[in-house]
Amino acid sequence: MAAIRLQDLARRYGKTAALEDITFTVPDGEFWVLVGPSGCGKSTVLRLIAGLDQPTAGQIYLGDRLINLIPARQRDVAMVFQNYALYPHMTVAENLDFGLRMRQLPVSQRRQRVEAVASSLAIDHLLDRKPPQLSGGQQQRVALGRAIAREPAAFLLDEPLSNLDAQLRDRTRTELKQLHARLGVTTLYVTHDQVEAMTLGDQVVVLDQGRIQQIGPPQAIYAQPVNRMVATFLGSPPMNILPATYADGVFRIGRQALPCLPAVQQALQPRDGEGFALGLRPEAMQIGDQPSSRRAPLTARLETLEPLGREILAIAQLPEVDAAIAFYAPGDWPGQPGTVYNLQCDLAQLFVFDASSGDTRYPPASPTD
């Protein structure tokens, strides 16, 4: 096992920058997640570490070893791809054994590793089958098993669960956490699914447009995002963003107003007429008519209801501004689309972003590592 360290990593294609200034270290034995929208460069990072592409600038270290110029087959990393890349003409056992055979390990040692890995992943009864005879979840286990059998210094996982159905994805996500706890291998996992990022990662690296936006524990990033992009990307459904103007101690959203709490005023020192983007997560809003010292009302017209069992996700439209908002209601709430309702907003959970740059103005955000 070994740490993965990236220093000032960049990848450019002509004048197009896929990655710029990527610097972080995954400590030995930790599970880190790279997350971001499609095209942000997260898979490119894995390809550079694996040796499937070459950086334009920067250094890649595996432990204390600089591996920029080392061929992919000699880097001692194992990569699991989104499409699994199994050999369809080989059995499961042959797929698991392939990397070991290429490394010319003794037959007895190869057989012992294949049997141990297959048992740990509960695919030992599938060793004589070929990939076309397997389900998606079984193929995913075989791909993981092939990587584990090599006993590499680090795992690179490129959206390995994206082809699975929702129920199997949830179960396999749990199995991945248990597997990492047993093996303790340094792991860098790429996904666009913020639920996977929040539930799997010891640390999360948020990428956008080829640059790191924020690094930190998932709950810390959720609670203190550095900018609007991070705030809206982590969280499902995403944070509600409301355009507002400050005037006379309140944030005005069209003709409606939310009080600007003293702590917010002290932090922002806002001027009358200054514009902001306010953020409220769905769980910070609820149906009700009883404001309090920390709650304030907003009126919105209900558009759609999405029953989720014990609760309902409701989507409503604020009057006079182009802003749809999501909030949760009890599972038996008799809401009617087209009806105007009062929502109580928890002002203690209010985020304030710069209207132009999107940087978080309040509350203070955790710095990027």
Image (cartoon, rainbow, N blue to C red):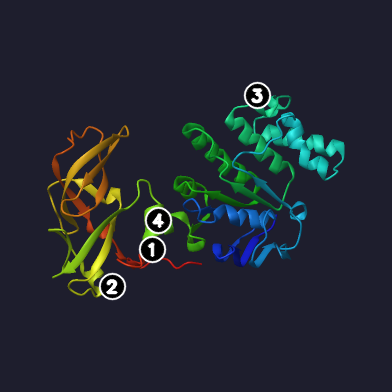
Q: Which residue is mark 3?
A: 133
Q: Earlier in the sequence, mark 1 or mark 4?
A: 4
Query: Where 166 sits versus 8, above or below?
Result: above
Q: CA distance from mark 1 to mark 4?
A: 11 Å
Name the residue beneath numbered marker 2: 267
Q: Residues within 10 Å of mark 1 (few under 14, many from 20)?
A: many
| Kind of residue at disc 4 | Tyr
The picture quadrant where one finds residue 252 is: bottom left
Neighbour tally class for label 4: few under 14, some 14-19, many 20 plus, Cα within 10 Å: some
| Label 4 element class | helix
**Callout 3 amino acid:** Gln
Disc 4 vs disc 3: which is toward the camera? 3
Residue picked out by circle 4 = 222
Callout 3: helix, strand or loop?
A: helix
Q: Is residue 42 above or below residue 353?
A: above
Tell which circle, 2 or 4, labels the residue nearer the N-terminal end.
4
Instruction: Where is residue 314? Give x, y as percent.
Output: 25, 41
Residues at marks 3 and 1, CA–CA distance in whole angstroms? 47 Å
Whole-number angstrom distance, CA of label 2 to CA of label 4: 20 Å
